[in-house]
Image (cartoon, rainbow, N blue to C red):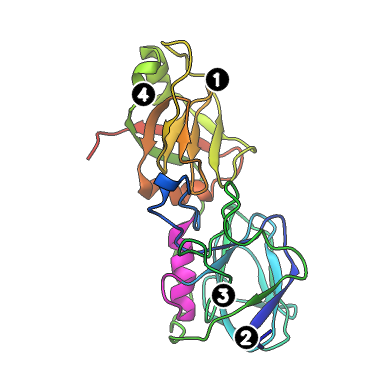
Amino acid sequence: MTDRALAVVRAGALTTVQDRGRPGHAHLGVPRSGALDAPAAALVNRLVGNPPAAAVLETTLTGCALRPRCAVTVAVAGAPCPVTVDGRPVSWGAPVGVPAGALLDVGPAGSGVRSYVAVSGGVLVEQVLGSRSTDLLSGLGPPPLCDGTVLALGRPVGRRAGVDVAPQPAPPAELVLRVTPGPRADWFTPGAVRTFTSRPYRVSPASNRIGLRVEGPSLERARPGELPSEGMVLGAVQVPPDGRPVVFLADHPTTGGYPVIGVVRPADLPAAAQAVPGTPVRFVAVRAR
């Protein structure tokens, strides 16, 4: 193993390798995958001088701890969290130098859900269909990290950003999701459609990279039975038999047989990646562009 590598000392609850995903393969049954909070992943890459497509680490709630075998520049953003090097506090949201053999500890999220860790040179796991992303649904890409995993790193190609701290949005106190109605809104009663875009919901603890589940009013169907399986897109709001909406995120299936009442604007999905269980959710109907 090259000395340009880092060892995972503490993997945390769920830490995966993510990049911009593998779009364009839905006809093969392959989800897009990629970082759920894409702007945060892009930011940490910029901070350490990586190209936009470089792979980063996505942590979930409890962070992770890493020990590089060479001197590296790292940046942590997304969900705010404490960051230390050999126990010494360092900046979150800014490039930080980590000596070879030092312990970088990315602590638990103080708010939000997912933090992103970029390392100069990027993480060099094997590409699958043009991406290094872990896909929890299909199993493509590397498995979630575990203690003792060693990850190869690429060679740095750019300079770290000359900033003290990079502004970024706070995790949402209320998640507002703009939805374009349809394509199967006619499978629901008029009252259910009104309920969907007028009543409050809350993020469910059952949410994951596949979908944001919500708790709240059940949506009544106007038609019995089920649809033949049809294509699903990122942001589709599918309604299973319990009547509670599920917003499809990066690792969503490419087909599904439950009706889709609306589709969330892509610009609103990064905030969904940082919405902790219990966060209020409002669906706001907008016209298709």
- Horizontal side of 289 relative to 214 (left or right) equals left
Q: CA distance from mark 4 to mark 3?
A: 42 Å
Residue with the mark numbered 2: 4
Q: CA distance from mark 2 to mark 1?
A: 50 Å
Image position, residue 258 (x, y; %): 48, 25
Residue with the mark numbered 3: 124
Q: Earlier in the sequence, mark 4 or mark 2?
A: 2
Residue with the mark numbered 4: 184
Crowding at dot 3, Cα within 10 Å, few <14 / some 14-19 / many 20+, comes out as some
Do the residues under discs 4 and 2 have CB atoms within 8 angstroms? no
Q: CA distance from mark 3 to mark 1?
A: 42 Å
What SS does tag 4 mark? loop
Image position, residue 115 (x, y; %): 58, 61
Q: Main secondary structure of the magenta part?
A: helix
Which sits in the foreground, 111 or 231?
A: 231
Q: Looking at the picture, which amino acid does disc 4 mark? A: Arg
Q: CA distance from mark 4 to mark 2?
A: 51 Å
Q: Looking at the picture, which amino acid does disc 2 mark? A: Arg
Q: Is residue 216 positioned above or below 88 on the image? A: above
Do the residues under discs 4 and 1 have CB atoms within 8 angstroms? no
